[in-house]
Image (tube, rainbow, N blue to C red):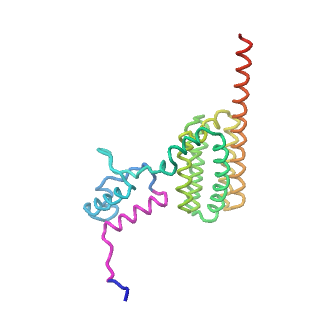
Amino acid sequence: MPFQPVQSDKLSAAVIRQIEQLILRGVLRPGERLPAERELSERLGVSRPSLREAVAELETRGLLEARAGAGIYVTDVLGSAFSEALIGLFSGHDEAVFDYLSFRRDLEGLAAERAASHGTDSDLKVIATILDKMQTAHGKRDPTEEAQLDADFHLAIIEASHNVIMLHMMRSMYQLLREGVFYNRQVMFKQRATRSTLLDQHRAINAALQARDGAAARAAVETHLNFVEAALFADRKAEAHEAVARQRLQRELR
């Protein structure tokens, strides 16, 4: 008979599984530092040798890394989602920018619809809290902070959809966006009218989510990303016109 004696998991195996789940579900994020060994062992209720064994195994698996004198961190594996050659292609062609926005519109619309029904009350509080921070940052007129919170807002919606594959795929996409591979987010926050419109659009997304209206949440995300696409297209067109105008000016100055 194909049965084996039942054995309880080693404590280190239970620790490994818990940390893996926290990383998978996006609770522990890439680049995040784990608590100090003593504190973490106390929180987990295991001995420090069991914790060390678990951490060593997770390092072997590439999920954690020890930094000399700094502690244990979740490995920043986001860059591995795309090869350097592909990232170079993305950054050099406008086609990738608009395909990226189209991809986001489809995926984030679905995520918002799912978040309205699958998100917990705490998920929706996270989204509302980030929106409050966005409104505060708007008053400071700090485009860097606004751009960061904008990304956090959208990722919180994806987290609230409770689909771990979508979460890690989109987190990887947002990392490239933060690095300016697809476009410079701060371009969207230069003009006051644009900044106000963007904030209003995020308010509309949040309102639909808080009302748990999936169709309205999806429509609000699509409206927002349509606006971003149009604004970026206009910016690209203005840059092209300016390049031609500079050529004409150079000819006249000769």
Q: How many marks?
A: 0
**In this view, which residue lies farthest toward the left?**
49
- The verdict on residue 198 being magenta is no
Q: Is residue 156 left or right of residue 54?
A: right
Quarter of the rendering containing residue 106: bottom right
Quarter of the rendering containing residue 28: bottom left
Question: What is the x, y in percent for residue 233?
Answer: 71, 38
Q: Nearer the viewer, residue 201 or 93?
A: 93
Quadrant (top left/top right/bottom left/bottom right) for the N terminus: bottom left
Quadrant (top left/top right/bottom left/bottom right) for the C terminus: top right
Q: Is residue 116 left or right of residue 230?
A: left
Q: Is residue 42 left or right of residue 161?
A: left
Question: What is the x, y in percent for residue 205?
Answer: 67, 52
Residue 218 drawn above or below residue 100: below
Q: Nearer the viewer, residue 149 or 1?
A: 1
Question: What is the x, y in percent for residue 26?
Answer: 49, 57
Range of magenta residues: 5-27
- The verdict on residue 26 being magenta is yes
Residue drawn where x is 68% and y is 47% of the image? 225
**In this view, which residue lies farthest toward the top?**
254
Question: What is the x, y in percent for residue 116?
Answer: 64, 62
**In this view, which residue lies farthest toward the front?**
85
Magenta stretch: dominant secondary structure: helix
Residue drawn where x is 60% and y is 51% of the image? 154
